[in-house]
Amino acid sequence: MEVFPKVLVLGPPTCYETLQHIYSHKFNFINPNSSDLSLHQFIISNHPPSIRAILCSASFTLTADFLRLFPSLGLVVTTSAGTDHIDLNECRRRQINVAGAGGLLSEDVADKAVALLIDTMRKISAADRYVRTRNHGGEWDFPLGYKLSGKRVGIVGLGSIGMEVAKRLESFGCIILYHSRHQRSSVSYPFYSSIVDLATNSNALVICCALNEQTKHIINSEVLLALGKEGFIVNVGRGGLIDENQLVKCLIEGEIGGAGLDVFENEPHVPQELLALDNVVLSPHCAAFTSESVMSLCELVGGNLESFFSNMPIITPLMLD
Amino acid sequence: MEVFPKVLVLGPPTCYETLQHIYSHKFNFINPNSSDLSLHQFIISNHPPSIRAILCSASFTLTADFLRLFPSLGLVVTTSAGTDHIDLNECRRRQINVAGAGGLLSEDVADKAVALLIDTMRKISAADRYVRTRNHGGEWDFPLGYKLSGKRVGIVGLGSIGMEVAKRLESFGCIILYHSRHQRSSVSYPFYSSIVDLATNSNALVICCALNEQTKHIINSEVLLALGKEGFIVNVGRGGLIDENQLVKCLIEGEIGGAGLDVFENEPHVPQELLALDNVVLSPHCAAFTSESVMSLCELVGGNLESFFSNMPIITPLMLD
């Protein structure tokens, strides 16, 4: 009987079911969620030195301690664009390859970001709730939203997602500004090295940078107050990019105009106060996922695993330098 | 005491309150809604031959019979882009000027159309509902939406709104097709003279044409079935453009994928069956209205009234030939 290489599945990722269906004749996926054992017991019972690859989603945190359980580990494949859940220093030290989703998810994430921005400014979900709950036959009297055209939108993180967001918003007649680690020579959008200055000069902020030690709580109360009472914020990055307590406070006190949030600091927990607000749009961390992107992601994950186990260069390596 | 020219207000339009505030020193707005009299009694008591201008919204129907009550009528100003609520034949016959909103509302309506399309395809409002009602702390398991990039979107009515919709959707990587009264020589999008053919070749339809005798129920069951089970439809035109009974039937039976509707056949009535569906996004006929557009509209309406009462050409005349 042929022995397929083991792949430990942690999370599990949204695309796992499809992936299993396509690749179970090539890899031996071992999934602790399908077992009654504790995670630790499950791993011990599966002979950790034989595990050379891990497949994970953003919801599973790979600490250095956890990675040390696997002395032969050579590859971590994550189905997310972000890699803040992986201890990259440890991977670098041990020369473990890390494969991300690359730019595969950028379009879908950007579409969601733009949708959340229009939704909060034009009150789309709030209008839907209004019609569904007040369909009593009386005249409609729904509050006005804000016009999108002509608004100044500050993008925080002008990577592949940020660029897709900018391209889309330009077609709506928005003016694009940005903050990034470095000014980008290839774009003409005004660059702000200070995020408070960016917020002061923007009608809306779209957060799509990576979460790391430098960017944690990059959106704090000072930034939110600079954005102001008629300012809107969208987050499709990671919950930890925003100081959530301060955001909730500003929303409740009317210090900012509204928020569209795909991510939260302690998922799947969403602050209870947000559930009652009409000027927020909430989403269960699904900006990257459509039927189409999940299929593409399966192919990419499968390709990375095949390359690795054939001793070929992986397709979407994260540069760990 | 100076006597201001009378303007009969019917509807009243969304911008009426602001308009009254700005222009009450120039015009004598008479509003039947502020009176206990019936509409007919109110008009009789206001000496109809002295009324030369009517200001109305899309929600008030100006029939030929109604217009005949005002022998000196010279101007109808509507705050809507559509004019299907005005008997244009009667206006033409009597040489009554008609002033619409012109292209003033096109951007806001187009923004809303694009928002409704992304919302239905990516399940934005449904996700918001999911988070608000199931925030029990368990893992999220929200169904996947459809990717927008690369989809073929058929626009029905390539006027100023349709062109703005096309421009926006191109930035999302959509492929634009269209149906219109006539093929437009200035655009390269593929033209379909048959709306069934357009639907067959589209993943989504965006309806933004005018409602008239030729376009009533232009979207019937044949078109909807051609659009198909994974097809989406957005309507920011008028409710009567779609055979609503057939649309409801197709949505319930899963014959189309979903719908984003700003307009309905018998507003403010919304078919009860739609309220329970997760694949529709409902909106109380407000695609054209933002704080900004209402201000601009006030200025335009005021300008049209001032021009008319100064015997100058009005600013946004509807061509009645």
Image (cartoon, coloured by chain):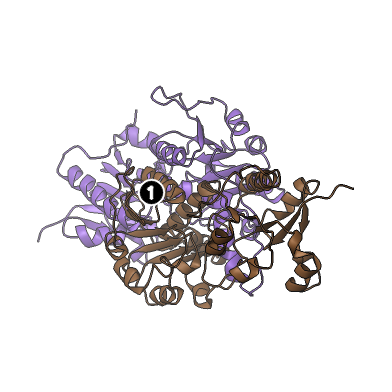
Chain colours: A brown, B purple
Q: Is residue B217 visible?
A: yes
Secondary structure at numbered mark 1: helix
Quarter of the image that includes the C terminus of chain B: top left
Quarter occupied by residue A77? bottom right
Taking depth in this image into account, of A171 and B3 the one nearest to the observer is A171
In this rendering, the answer to whether A62 lies above or below B3 is below
In this rendering, the answer to whether A247 lies above or below B308 is below
Amino acid bearing label 1: Asp
Report the chain holding disc 1.
Answer: B
Instruction: Give the image location of residue B124, x and y in percent.
Output: 55, 57
Instruction: Give the image location of residue A318, x and y in percent.
Output: 53, 51
Instruction: Give the image location of residue A91, x and y in percent.
Output: 57, 60
Instruction: Give the image location of residue A17, x and y in percent.
Output: 74, 54
- How many residues crowd mark 1 within 10 Å: few (<14), some (14–19), many (20+)? many
Taking depth in this image into account, of A113 and A37 the one nearest to the observer is A37
**Image position of A206 (left or right of A192):** right
In this rendering, the answer to whether A121 lies above or below B221 is below
Which residue does the numbered mark 1 point to in the structure image?
A: B108
In this rendering, the answer to whether A104 lies above or below B18 is above
**Image position of B275 (left or right of B46):** right
Quarter of the image that includes the N terminus of chain B: bottom left
